[in-house]
Image: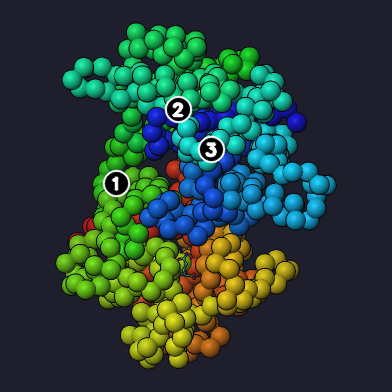
Amino acid sequence: MTTRFIFVTGGVVSSLGKGLAAAALGSLLQGHGYKVRLRKLDPYLNVDPGTMSPTQHGEVFVTDDGAETDLDLGHYERFTGVHARQSDNITTGRLYSNVIAKERRGDYLGATVQVIPHITDAIKEFVLADLTDEDFCICEIGGTVGDIEGLPFLEAIRQLGNDLGRERSLFIHLTLLPYIATAGELKTKPTQHSVKELLSVGIQPDILLCRADRPIPENERRKIGLFCNIAQDRVIAALDVDTIYRVPINYHEQGFDRAVLRFFNLECNEPDTSKWATIVKRVLEPEGEVTIAIAGKYVSLLDSYKSLHEALLHGGIANNVRVNLKWIDSETFEKEDVSSYLEGVHGILVPGGFGERGTEGKIKAAQYAREHNIPYFGICFGMQLAVIEAVRHLGGIPDATSSEFGPSEHAIIGLMTEWLKGDQLEKRRKDGDLGGTMRLGAYPCKILKGTKLHDIYGADEIQERHRHRYEVNLETYRDAFDKAGLVFAGLSPDGVLPEMVERKDHPWFIGVQFHPELRSKPFDPHPLFRSFIEAAKKQSCLV
Ligand code: GLN
């Protein structure tokens, strides 16, 4: 293996866009013809982000192989098209639980188990594992330099710099140059301090990416170079952009890819960034617009629906329209007259979610869409609640519900305790752990011929990513579903699990038990989002 490793750290403040920087660099390197992989090392103590509230940490991004990961992996996939794996995201929590399990087994042969070398070795092993012919592996270190939790990770990558040699390891540090209006200047001091902090753990950054809201004057770049011991052409401006999909183009203009390739003594030709130029144009100069209402519970933090937000934008790119999003808190919504929120929107979407709070609002949204012939897209929870709505109001079971909300006579959505994954039977207990125990990752789904969903996908069988515990109880309530006009157009290959539902009596009413937003790319919009926005566009001509 001759993979080169690029370590990306962040300083000064969080939220500077380290994940995007890593993703955009990955895409630029692909544009130069290289094969890349991207990884994220997260210093928090949760074993994975699966049990964290989306309003705290943003969405949980699920990989094909069923890992619940950090949302940055979504950026990586959307920018590079490389599907992430279990081996691309690790947390302090998982590292410690692995190391402690080994210690209990007696694998350390009597040694005192310590952060250095045992945790740092586990980090190094993780960074180097599961790579074959990749030219570059970009590893992002979560958090900000100076965080206590981050220290073992910095120590591990420092060691890796030595182990691999400088010809195979590069350290990139992302910082902020704040503009101080009274001085009329971009300030370099926080960057100098941040680099000092990195130096104190033995890492001299090779390239600095400096976030700034305006071009960095030559003099400031020189100063940063001088104080941070970095050649001036390796101090790269990371300027604010109008759309994130401009980042690769911008980085290239600022010489980022050139600096990286030169560092490794690789030739630097002109990379292909044309796809980003097309996407940027589509995003910024659309020919029309549609408004989609999203009734969800985690609307207070945009990042909690990150992939959904992007997938809707991709649907807009495919249809050449701007997609305006109207976020509606389903809890407030359930107490009020829904028409004041939903009148005039061109599509209604109910995303994934957990727990009973706010569900009546989501059910009202599905009902409004059904009764007013407005395109409806229900994702995971949004499908389950649309099914409940239809069965309550059309299927003759007024108290239809989900067992997620407590015991009830008519749980038409029930807890799954076993299901097939390939040839393996997966089993869960009612009182089992919450973390990592859902039906997770890509599962195949067969699509019924002659349905709208079959037309949309243009395929008999597809694979989509799941993250849920409950499932429509098709077996017991088949008659009620028929009566309610629900057509289960997609089923698991064994015919047991309903994966997709549609209505025949409606222009576009679709629910899916999986998360299609996780697979959408700006250069390859997901067929369901493409079709949903197309339906919304038609709707916009009607209203
Ligand atoms: N709470 C539902 C379940 O666990 C839906 C989950 C989701 O929307 N991701 O089945």
The Cα atoms of the two marked residues, 1 and 2, are separated by: 31 Å
Label of residue 190 in the image: none
Residue 275: horizontal and vertical position, in percent?
46, 33
Please rate how many residues cluster around mark 3, counting C-alpha atoms within 10 Å: few if below 14, some from 14 to 19, many from 20. many
The residue wearing badge 1 is 322
Q: Residue at x 70, y 72 (%)?
A: 425
Q: Residue 362, position in %: x, y?
A: 32, 70
Residue 155 vs 102, above or below: the answer is above
Residue holding disc 2: 174
CA–CA distance in space, label 3 to label 1? 40 Å
Q: Give me the residue at 71% from left, 55% from top.
A: 101
Reading the chain from its start, which is encountered first: label 3 or label 1? 3
**SS for callout 2:** strand
Which residue is label 3 attached to?
150
Q: Secondary structure at mark 1?
A: strand
Q: Amino acid at mark 3?
A: Gly
Mark toward the start of the polypeptide (2 vs 3):
3
